[in-house]
Image (cartoon, helix red, strand yellow):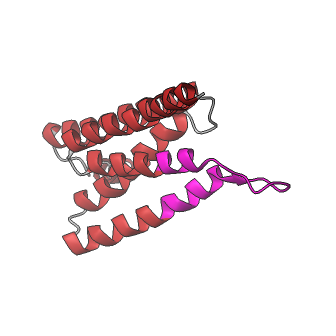
Amino acid sequence: MSIWQEIGATVVSEFSDIPDVAQLTRISLRLLVAAVLGGILGYERELQGKSAGVRTHMLVAIGAALFVLIPQQAGASNEELSRVLQGLIAGIGFLGTGAIIMGNKEVQTRGLTTAAGLWVTAAIGMAAGMGRESTAVLSTLIAILILSVVPWVFRTKHANKQ
C-alpha cells in the first residue's frame, strides 16, 4: 500500500463515525431540531432587546445536543451519560452567570430571565439530542408562553390597578 493510499484510508476511517444514512438522518434531525427550537427562543429574546439572541440560543441548543449525541454514538452507558448531563447542567450555569449583571450603585440585578432562558435552551437541546423531539417542542412552546404571555398578563393586571 502506498503512502497516499494509507493516508486516504486513514482519512476515510476518521470520518466513519456515521455508519449509514439512517444514522446520518437521525443526527442531522436532532441537531436541526435543537437549532430551530433554540432559534425560536433566541428570536423572542432578541425582540425584547436582550443581548443573548438567536445565534447564542441556537449555539447553546446545538452544543447541548452534541454533548448528549456524542456519548450516545460512543456507546456510553446510562450512568456515563448521566455524568455528562450533570456536567452540562452545571456548565450552562456559568454561561448564565455571564448574562447576569449587578449594578454597583443600586442593588439591581439584570439578566436573570436571559440566564434562565439559556438554561432552558440547553435542556431543550439535550432533549432533542437524546431523541426526545416532542418533549423539546413542547418545552419550547411552554417557554415561549412564559417569556411572552406572562409579562403581558402582569402588564395588563398592573395597568388595570392604576
Q: Quadrant of the C terminus?
A: top right
Give the vertical position of 57 relative to 17 (above or below). above
Q: Position of residue 30 (x, y in %)?
A: 27, 40
Q: Residue lying at the far right in this picture: please name it.
A: 105
Decide which of 113, 31 is in the foreground and name it.
Answer: 113
103 drawn magenta: yes
Residue at left offset 37%, top offset 56% = 67
- Is 144 displayed left or right of 49 in the figure? left
Q: Position of residue 129 (x, y in %)?
A: 28, 48
Q: Position of residue 24 (x, y in %)?
A: 22, 39
The region drawn magenta spans: 91-118
Q: Position of residue 63 (x, y in %)?
A: 43, 49
- Is 7 displayed left or right of 72 in the figure? right
Could one spot residue 54 in this view of the protein? no
4 drawn magenta: no
- Is 131 displayed left or right of 87 in the figure? left
Residue at left offset 49%, top offset 39% = 57
Residue at left offset 52%, top offset 25% = 160
Could one spot residue 74 in this view of the protein? yes
Give the vertical position of 56 relative to 78 (above or below). above
